[in-house]
Structure formats: structure tokens, C-alpha cells
Image: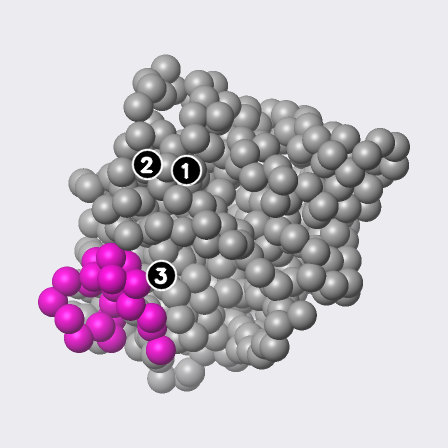
């Protein structure tokens, strides 16, 4: 195992009725911007709960942060933050709203002329405008990590950012919100969290026994609760385990001491930027081709995953590894998640070449756990995903 530190300053308020308790976590003299996406929080009771919790504060609302948080919309919010002297933000929503607020946290204190440079130039944020979150859609783990991904529609770009200054001060996780989430978004959340774990786990054996089992336990839990949550989102026990699995999948714990892959996400982000495909579904598109293309490098962990998560016991290492890939595809299909780019757009020809060219232009010359996946390799993986 590698040497590492695990620092996560986010305080979690988990369980029924916790929205009411968040006021104690916000500075009493704060001027708060309350940010959210569409109108769902006004129909499921979350908006009213948040307003009640913030009743003692000076609050400015900003609605309309879209899925795949859009730079132009966030710049409108940034202008209000600066003109109204906002000192604390509250993100109420899923990963898109939270990621958008992370960008605003960095941009509010950024001294440069063009905030997009934070993403374009991979500027690490050491200090940001403080914010909390109320999670309404489990999926990304953004409620307990310091990373974010932002989309810029005009240039068809989707880039990531991060830094220790972008951890939420607190995050409220009330599993009761799950009961109002549409089936499609539940399926996306399960797929997103499942792939987050695999990106950290599916590399090569390094003797990190406990870390492997942490990851496998999250995968097993998601497999177990997925049909329950899809069938009955009001099942509190299933919803709570689903929500906590999504948070634990990407709060930094399971990746400590391990190599990480993240090539699937890098390629998937391009599909979202180009075609507007849901983030989770782009991961399901890329994953099978990526694992098959890099099969020799990953077959030992694939076989271990097949044995421990899917109960595959018979066959050679290669056989079990191949079965594990198929079991994963079957799992996504059980959630009604398609796994080919051609299932989402008829205009897929040329996609692989365009993504390869973009990676070359950005200087991304070595993706994956070994940093050896070149833009030429990326082109081949994406073509396998058609």
C-alpha cells in the first residue's frame, strides 16, 4: 500500500428530519445564497423545510442550475454573490447543484479575469467561499468530497476541478427524499455510484486487503438494494443504504493507498458534452469497452470482483474476468441503462476520433492507473463502445 493521509472536514447530518438541524452549522451573521435546480424541491417538501431552517438568516435564492451545471448560468449566480456580498452558500439538490456551488465557491475568491481558467488550467482551490449542502439525489458523492465537474455548452467542454477548499462545511442526508426521485434518476444514481467504486477498485492487486473489501461491500450493497429502491423508493431502509453507499463510494475513503483509473469518467464526460447524455449512462457506455480493451492489465481484479461481488466460482482467471464484465453489463441493463453509444444517438460515427483529438490538444497523454492509455487507445475504446 502507498503512504497516505485521509482528511475529510465535511460534517454529515444523516437521517430523518435533519434539515431542521442545519441552521446550527451556519454562522449566525451569514448572508446566505440558497441555490437549487428545478422545481422538484417545491413539490416534495424539501423547499419548505429549507426555508424554515433558514428563517433567521438573510437569504437570497438562485434557482435553475441545470443537470451538468452550465458555466453561463453559474456566472449569473457569481455576479449576484459579488454584488450582494454573499458569505455562505447552501446547495440543495443532487451532484449538479453541488458541483455548481463548488465552482462558485472557487470563483467567488478567484483573483483572475476569467473564472473558466480554474477548470481549463486545473487551478487547485485552497480556499473557497464556505457552503453546505442538502442532498436530494444520491449519486455523485459530491456532498462529501472536494471535486466538481462543470459544463460549458458554447465550447462543448466538460472539465473537472477540485482542491481542499471545496469540501462542504456540512451535508444533510435525509433518506426520505429518495421516495420522490423518478425511476430514471434512481437508476442513474445507482450506476454512477457503482462506477465510482469500480474506478478506484478495478486496477491491479497491491495487497490492500481491507480497501478491496470496503469497495466490494459498497458494490454488494448497491446490487442488493437496487431492485428494492427502484420498486419502492419509499422503503426507508433501502433508501438509507442506497444514499450512504453513494456517499461512501466517493468520499475518499476507499481510494486511500490505492491507484485509481478514472479513464471511464474522462471519456464519459466527453459524451455528455457532445450529446447531452446523462453522466451515469455515459459511464455505462464506456465501461465494457474499457475493461475489454485493457483486459490483460485488469483481469486479476476483474476475476476477484467476479468472485466476491457476483459469486462466480468456476473457470480460469480469464473466464471469471470475462463473466464479471458481462455481469456488470447485465446489472446496468436490469436498471434499464443502455450500454452502447448507438442506443443514444444515430450520429456516433466520428465520436472516437473527436475525443482522441481533444485529449491530444489538452496534453492528456496517459490516462488510467498506469498512465499509459494514450489518445490513440482512447479512440479504440470509444469505438468499442459504439
Asked whether, in this view, residue 305 is left or right of residue 138, the answer is right
Segment colored magenta: 107-126
Direction from residue 320 to residue 314 in the image, left or right: right
Q: Earlier in the sequence, mark 2 or mark 3?
A: 3
Which circle marks residue 39 in the picture?
A: none
Q: Is residue 125 magenta?
A: yes
Give whichever of discs 3 and 1 has the lower sequence position. Answer: 3
Residue 161 image label: 3
**Please, is residue 239 above or below residue 85 in the view?**
above
Disc 2 residue crowd, few under 14, some 14–19, many 20+, Cα 10 Å: many
Q: Mark 2 vs mark 1: which is more N-terminal?
A: 2
Q: Element under label 2? A: helix
Q: Is residue 243 above or below residue 126?
A: above
Residue 42 visible in the snapshot: no
Crowd around label 1: few <14 · some 14–19 · many ≥20 (10 Å):
many
Quarter of the image for residue 344 reads top left
Q: Secondary structure at mark 3?
A: strand
Residue sitting at 51 percent across and 62 percent down?
A: 143
Mark 2 or mark 3: which is in front?
2
C-alpha separation, residue under disc 2 versus residue under disc 1: 8 Å
Marks 2/1 in contact by CB < 8 Å: the verdict is yes
Amino acid at each position: 500500500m502507498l503512504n497516505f493521509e485521509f482528511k475529510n472536514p465535511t460534517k454529515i447530518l444523516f437521517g430523518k428530519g435533519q434539515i431542521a438541524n442545519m441552521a446550527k452549522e451556519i454562522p449566525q451573521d451569514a448572508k446566505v445564497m440558497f441555490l437549487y435546480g428545478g422545481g422538484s424541491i417545491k413539490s416534495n417538501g424539501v423547499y419548505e423545510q429549507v426555508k424554515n431552517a433558514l428563517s433567521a438568516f438573510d437569504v437570497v435564492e438562485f434557482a435553475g442550475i441545470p443537470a451538468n451545471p452550465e458555466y453561463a448560468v453559474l456566472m449569473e449566480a457569481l455576479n449576484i454573490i459579488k454584488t450582494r456580498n454573499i458569505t455562505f452558500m447552501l446547495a440543495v439538490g443532487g451532484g449538479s447543484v453541488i458541483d455548481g456551488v463548488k465552482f462558485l465557491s472557487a470563483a467567488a475568491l478567484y483573483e483572475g479575469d476569467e473564472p473558466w481558467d480554474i477548470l481549463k488550467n486545473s487551478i487547485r482551490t485552497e480556499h473557497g467561499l464556505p457552503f453546505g449542502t442538502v442532498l436530494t439525489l444520491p449519486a455523485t458523492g459530491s456532498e462529501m468530497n472536494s471535486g466538481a465537474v462543470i459544463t460549458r455548452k458554447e465550447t462543448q467542454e466538460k472539465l473537472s476541478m477540485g482542491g481542499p477548499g471545496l469540501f462542504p462545511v456540512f451535508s444533510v442526508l435525509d433518506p426520505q427524499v429518495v421516495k420522490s426521485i423518478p425511476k430514471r434518476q434512481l437508476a442513474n444514481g445507482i450506476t454512477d455510484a457503482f462506477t465510482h467504486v469500480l474506478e478506484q477498485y478495478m486496477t491491479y492487486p497491491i495487497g490492500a486487503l481491507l480497501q478491496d473489501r470496503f469497495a466490494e461491500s459498497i458494490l454488494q450493497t448497491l446490487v442488493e438494494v437496487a431492485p428494492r429502491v427502484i420498486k419502492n423508493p419509499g422503503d426507508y431502509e433501502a433508501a438509507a443504504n442506497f444514499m450512504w453507499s453513494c456517499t461512501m463510494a466517493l468520499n475518499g475513503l476507499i481510494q486511500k493507498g490505492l491507484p485509481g483509473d478514472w479513464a471511464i469518467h474522462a471519456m464519459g464526460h466527453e459524451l455528455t458534452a457532445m450529446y447531452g447524455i446523462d453522466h451515469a449512462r455515459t459511464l455505462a457506455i464506456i465501461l465494457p469497452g474499457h475493461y475489454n480493451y485493457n483486459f490483460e492489465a485488469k483481469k486479476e481484479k476483474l476475476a476477484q470482483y467476479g468472485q466476491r461481488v457476483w459469486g462466480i466460482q468456476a473457470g480460469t482467471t480469464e473466464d471469471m474476468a470475462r463473466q464479471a464484465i458481462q455481469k456488470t453489463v447485465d446489472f446496468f441493463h436490469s436498471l434499464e441503462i443502455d450500454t452502447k453509444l448507438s442506443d443514444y444517438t444515430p450520429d456516433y460515427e466520428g465520436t472516437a476520433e473527436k475525443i482522441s483529438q481533444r485529449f491530444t490538444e489538452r496534453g492528456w497523454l496517459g490516462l488510467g492507473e498506469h498512465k499509459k492509455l494514450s489518445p490513440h487507445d482512447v479512440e479504440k475504446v470509444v469505438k468499442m463502445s459504439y
